[in-house]
Amino acid sequence: MKKSNKYTVTAALPYANGPIHIGHLAGVYLPADIFVRYLRRNKIDVIFICGSDEHGVPIAMQAKKEKKTPKEIVNKYHYMIKDCFNNFGIQFDNYSRTSTKIHHEISTSFFKKLNEKKKIFEKVSEQYYDKEAQQFLADRYISGTCPHCKNEEAYGDQCEDCGRPLIPEDLISPKSTISGSFPILKKTKHWYFPLNQYQKFLEKWILINHKKDWKVNVYGQAKSWLDQGLKPRAITRDLNWGVPVPQDKGKVLYVWFEAPIGYISSTIEWSKQTKIDWKPYWKDENTKLIQFIGKDNIVFHCIIFPVILKAYNSGYILPDKILANEFLHLENKKISTSKNWAVWVHEYLKDFPNQQDPLRYILIANMPEKKDNNFNWKNFQIKNNTELVAILGNFVNRSLTLIQKYNKGIVPYPEMLSIKDKNILTKIKDYPEHIGNLIESYQFRESLACFMDLARLGNKYLTEEEPWSKKKEKRINTILYVSLQIVGMLAQLAEPFLPYTAKKLLDMLRLKTFFWNKIKNIEEILCPGHVLGKTVFLFKKISNESIEKQMKKLKKIQSFMQ
């Protein structure tokens, strides 16, 4: 990764028609959070931007389902999602929402300027209309068979099976999801964005500039769209919920036109609150824009949003990286919000209070970076009990308990260091750079594995050296000193992955965090004579009963699905 002094990091705006689940965390928010925490630890100027996506057909559909207004729905889920992020230690600089006045103003200003400069055009076309409901059928108000994978339950905006973006006209045997009736074609006027005019610009930007440095799935999906040839796409909808189209009652901006502009409006909102100029984060060519998104959002971030910025022509930078993971499955079945087949984050927090880091750990360890991966409750229990408890927690607890027993909680002065001791003290100083290089290259699973290798190294050293043995009486101070240097290094490196654990560790050691790139140059992380704090357990075992409870919950959901 080429270093930059300024970063804008965005995480995909979660859709406020329901709570967030573990697939969202593993796919988007944990990788983004690890990356941002690492940048902050390197004293790099970074803002981390997100917010709730609160417009579009699914919101209106959920409102109808719950017998509430769309505003009531987005309020309910916005605060639920925001609380989950806060409780999970995901630290946005600003978490906004697209229903704010500022977002309406900014997204409308984009539309107005593009219209004034004739970068968009009006067109009357025939679109599907439900005579029973007396409504045009945009996006999720219409379903049918996907022309690509033949899934019979594809929506008018996207197929959830193959992830391909669609338009209603693509569907085979379309029907209304409101009444179940077969729609008719009826004329209506909309504004269109001529994506085809930006084909060459995108080919140069993506196919030439980013062929080697973008993830294979992101590059491949963007290339597939470009290979098919871009076509004009409607950027307005016949709906009454959304950002109103100026001077045209009953029409709103298409959610995938205005939602990505939410990154900019959220940054401007942050700027108004902090009195810090937002423009360098979006208009300085030396700033790197890094976007973490879901796999099903690739086209909108690689094709539509960059073209909007290019057409608007106001000095906005384009993304340096657009990062999308594959899908996380639950018990070997695809996570499905509509079928309630998910582990909901707010429910996890209730069932496993104060155990955010074990879930962070398993989701990072199983992160679907290159291929679909799976979460299952039994594996969650095993990894918690055999890795977090038995390796990391056990090593830290044994080291600190022995210091209390043999040296009253004070870091001892080492005696003569053996060759093995010296090798270990040298080796642990390489870990910040190794882990940092992996985070910088967006290999988050590998970076966590490297961190756990350090814990394994400490565990192995302490077990082999046996400071509690009478034979080692003369070496006990040295062994404990070396062990504590490993504990100190773990405390310094844990925070991007396990922030709550890192805080516990630092409090126990009475230690402050060092800047990441300076850690390897520090002679001793814990100096002899330093008094340690109170020892607490880092992790606790997860019982069979708690796992059985989760499995019963899933079996109940499964019975409804059949």
Image (cartoon, rainbow, N blue to C red):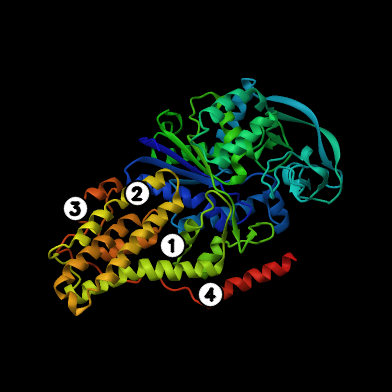
Q: Check disc 3 and report the residue beneath it.
A: 523
- The mark found on residue 453 in the picture is none
Q: What residue type is labelled 3?
A: Glu
Task: Tell which residue pokes out farthest to the front in this image.
Answer: 419
Q: Which amino acid does label 1 sit on?
A: Asp
Q: Return the disc, 1 or 4, that comes first in the chain's sequence.
A: 1
Foreground tag (1 vs 3): 3
* Image marks 1 and 2: residues in contact by CB distance under 8 Å: no
Element on which disc 3 rests: loop
Element on which disc 4 rests: helix
* Image marks 2 and 4: residues in contact by CB distance under 8 Å: no
Q: Return the disc, 3 or 2, that comes first in the chain's sequence.
A: 2
Q: Check disc 2 and report the residue beneath it.
A: 434
Whether residue 239 sits left or right of residue 451 in the image: it is right
Q: Where is residue 484 in the image (x, y as percent from the top left)?
A: 24, 64
Kindly identify the residue that appears in the image at 44 percent across and 74 percent down: 541
Q: Position of residue 289 (x, y in %)?
A: 46, 36
Q: How far apart are marks 1 and 4 (CA)?
A: 17 Å
Element on which disc 2 rests: helix
Q: Which amino acid does label 4 sit on?
A: Ser
Q: Return the disc, 1 or 3, that comes first in the chain's sequence.
A: 1
Q: Check disc 4 and report the residue beneath it.
A: 546
Q: Position of residue 69 (x, y in %)?
A: 68, 52
- Quadrant of the rendered image containing residue 488: bottom left
Foreground tag (4 vs 3): 3
Q: Which amino acid does label 2 sit on?
A: His
In front of the other: 349 or 323: 323
In front of the other: 556 or 126: 556
Q: Position of residue 410 (x, y in %)?
A: 17, 68
